[in-house]
Every structure is written in C-alpha cells, then in structure tokens.
C-alpha cells in the first residue's frame, strides 16, 4: 500500500468533524479504513448509502442521534453526501455527545459542502484527497524511477487503480470506466444537467485546449449553449474535481489580459480518456500541453498538502508576453514558465521585469521539474 500524505491520527479531534473531500476513486474509503484498522478508539462505521442512516440524520432528532452514538468515541460515515441535511445532523453529534470524534468522506464537493459548511462552522476541518501526488509516490519510487515513469504519468495519470494496474490495456480500461461511470456520474446525476452531449462536447473542447486561454463566449458558441449555462457547467466541473480553473493575473497594467481563463484537468489520464488518446509521447503533438497540465496539478497538490497559502494565476499581455503559472504568496509574486524541452531558451518577459521588480521567475523543464513539485 502506498502511504497517503495525510495522517488521520493527527487530524481527528474531540468535538470536531473531519471532512475528507475528493474525486471518486482516489482512495478516500481506503484511507478511512486503513485508519480504522489500527485505531484504538471505539468506533462505528456507516455509509451514506444506507437508507436508515439517511433517515436518522435527516430527522435531526436529538434523542435518536445521541442514542445512535452512545458508547462510541468515533463516528465514521463514508459517502456522507448522500445524506440530506448531514451538516445539521453532525452538528447535533459534536455539540451534544461529549468527547465524540467524527470523520466523513464525500466525493462531490459542491453537494457535500452545501450540506455541511454552515451548520458546522467552527466545528470541522476539511481536507482534499487527490489522485496520487509525486510526493506520495516517492514512498514507492526514488527520484530516478519517478523520472523514468514520467511518460506513464503524462498519459495515464495517477489514480490509485491506474498506478497499481499491471498492463497498458488494463490502465486504459480503468480510465475509461472511471471517467464514464464514476467522475461524470456526479455531474449527470444532477437534475439541472440535461444536456449530457453538450457537456461532453465542452469537456472535449477543453481537453484540446489545455494550457490555452479560453473565453466563455467562445466556448458557448462552439458547443451551442448560452453563456450562463456554460458558466454553470464549468463551475460544476470544478466542484466535482474534474477541472481546475486559472484566472489571468493583473495589477491593472493596461496590456495585461485578465478576462480569459485557462482550464486544467485534475488528472492527465482523465483528460486523455475524454478524447480517447493514449498514444505514446513519440506519436503525439500535445506533449507540451500534457507536461504543463501535469506540472500545474502536481504543484497544486503539493501546495495544498504542504499548506502553502496563496493564489495561482497565469499571466499574458496582448502583445504575446506570457508566463504559464503565477503564484502569489505572502505578498510576493513567483512566475514559472513550463517547457517540455530542456533545451528551450527562454528569456524573462520584459513587461514582467518592468512591472513586478520584486518578483521571481523560473523555467520548469524535464531537468528540474521534480524539485518544483516535491
């Protein structure tokens, strides 16, 4: 078993709820079960799929919920997003059962957060579990081996089942099933999402434009939907951990572009599954985009796990000067240009130097990428 970054023993607290978000099939249940297998706490494990549990917490009946938890030190609920009013039910637990600890998992961020957020203000800690990060995989492979496997990560991503699959054929089958039956399930199950074909067309369009700026108007025109619908679909795709949006950075410099966005996929394998492209790198014309998507998302995972607080953007001027990734942390700016070719000669954009004199700038390539994302 590859060890995950989080140590739940250190995260659970009396009188608090620990909420574990993340895409489907990234190992949230495995992480929870691994913790339960060795904890000395007396616990009760249930699933949000249980109609009985749904009715119990939705009832908000103080006496029943308190009786349900009596005699236990820990209550664990997997797939908690299935439970109506779960936030209010958990609030009853943490407020009225002395010393209780609570852990819940949920695959659908927008759904679970709406049900949990406000009722548990001040009573919860939230963590996000991603597909395996390079930091986590360093437990299994050394740096040399990670570099040797870079092509696999760019093509097949790093979902746990994919990482442990033995053959290329098996990896592809897992990704196709994962994308069609799990990741998109959260989206298509929503009553308001009726245009499944248009949403898939939108995803395919974005898959071909990884690393490029896009506008809502352009996307809406190409998938034959109105701008508001496209905006809503993109918001849902972000909240269900399919896409990550980067906005344009600007300090009101007249020539900077800030109206467009870039979209990256949380996992390269999912991106390739959506467009059914699993060719080797030697037979592809999108290697630069794959590498950029991989670096941006691995950096996001690393920042999240290591609690680097800040915002991420891209930067571009109307005359074509650009930087792929900008991080703003502690009042400072850090610019990173991501290039697949280690031989590419890149100069720091002149406008960047002129307008952000105290910023840093670095090129990330095959030579130094691991130092950037570990």
Image: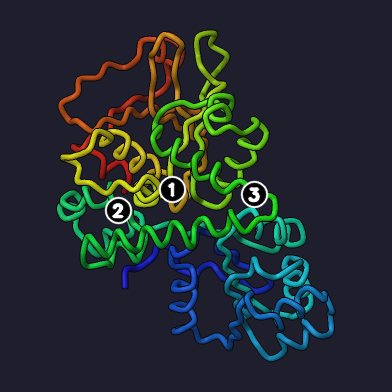
Taking the spot 70% from the left edge, 61% from the top edge, the residue there is 116
The residue closer to the viewer here, 101 or 266, is 266
Calculate the distance from the C-alpha at mark 2 to the C-alpha at mark 3. Answer: 29 Å
> Quick check: 61 above or below 306?
below
Residue indicated by mark 1: 266
Residue receiving disc 3: 194
| Disc 3 residue crowd, few under 14, some 14–19, many 20+, Cα 10 Å | few
Question: Residue 14: percent from the left, percent from the top?
Answer: 64, 74
In front: label 2 or label 1: 2
Q: What element carries label 1?
A: loop
Q: Which residue is drawn at 53% across and 11% down?
A: 253
From mark 1 to mark 3, how far is it between C-alphas?
24 Å
- Left or right position of 371 against 223: left
Residue 347: % across, % down: 27, 16
The residue that appears at 40% across and 48% down in the rendered structure is 274
Q: In which quarter of the image is residue 370?
A: top left
Secondary structure at numbered mark 3: loop
Give whichever of discs 1 and 3 has the lower sequence position: 3
Dot 1 surroundings within 10 Å: few (below 14), some, or many (20 or more)? many
Give residue 232's quadrant in the image: top right
Mark 2–mark 1 Cα distance, whole angstroms, equals 12 Å
x and y, in percent, of residue 43 in the image: 59, 85
Please name the residue that numbered disc 2 is placed on.
156
Q: Which of 258 and 179 is in front in this view?
A: 179
Pointer 1 with pointer 3, Cβ within 8 A: no
Q: Please identify the quadrant where the N terminus is shown.
A: bottom left
Q: Is mark 2 on a helix, strand or loop?
A: helix
């Amino acid at each position: 078993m590859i060890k995950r970054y989080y140590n739940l023993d250190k995260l659970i607290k009396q009188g608090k709820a620990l909420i574990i978000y993340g895409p489907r099939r990234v190992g949230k249940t495995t992480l929870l079960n691994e913790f339960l297998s060795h904890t000395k706490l007396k616990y009760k494990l249930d699933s949000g799929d249980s109609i009985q549990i749904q009715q119990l917490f939705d009832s908000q009946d103080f006496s029943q919920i308190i009786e349900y938890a009596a005699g236990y030190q820990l209550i664990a609920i997997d797939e908690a997003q299935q439970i109506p009013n779960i936030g209010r039910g958990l609030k009853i637990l943490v407020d009225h059962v002395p010393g209780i600890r609570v852990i819940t998992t949920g695959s659908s961020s927008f759904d679970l957060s709406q049900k949990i957020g406000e009722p548990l203000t001040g009573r919860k800690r939230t963590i996000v579990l991603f597909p395996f990060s390079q930091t986590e995989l360093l437990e299994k492979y050394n740096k040399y081996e990670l570099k040797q496997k870079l092509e696999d990560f760019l093509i097949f991503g790093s979902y746990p089942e994919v990482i442990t699959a033995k053959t290329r054929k098996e990896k592809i089958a897992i990704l196709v099933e994962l994308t069609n039956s799990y990741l998109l399930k959260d989206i298509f199950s929503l009553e308001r999402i009726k245009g499944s074909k248009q949403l898939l067309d939108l995803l395919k369009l974005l898959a071909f434009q990884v690393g490029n700026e896009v506008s809502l108007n352009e996307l809406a025109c190409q998938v034959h939907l109105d701008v508001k619908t496209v905006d809503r679909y993109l918001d849902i795709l972000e909240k269900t951990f399919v896409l990550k949006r980067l906005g344009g950075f600007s300090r009101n410099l007249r020539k900077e572009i800030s109206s467009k966005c870039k979209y990256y996929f949380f996992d390269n394998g999912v991106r390739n599954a959506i467009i059914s492209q699993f060719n080797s790198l030697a037979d592809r014309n999108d290697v630069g985009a794959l590498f950029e998507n991989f670096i941006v998302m691995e950096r996001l995972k690393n920042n999240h796990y290591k609690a680097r607080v800040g915002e991420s953007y891209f930067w571009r001027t109307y005359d074509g000067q650009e930087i792929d990734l900008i991080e703003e942390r502690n009042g400072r700016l850090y610019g990173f240009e991501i290039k697949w070719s280690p031989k590419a000669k890149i100069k720091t954009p002149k406008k960047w130097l002129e307008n952000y004199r105290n910023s840093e700038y670095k090129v990330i390539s095959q030579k130094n990428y691991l130092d950037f994302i570990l």
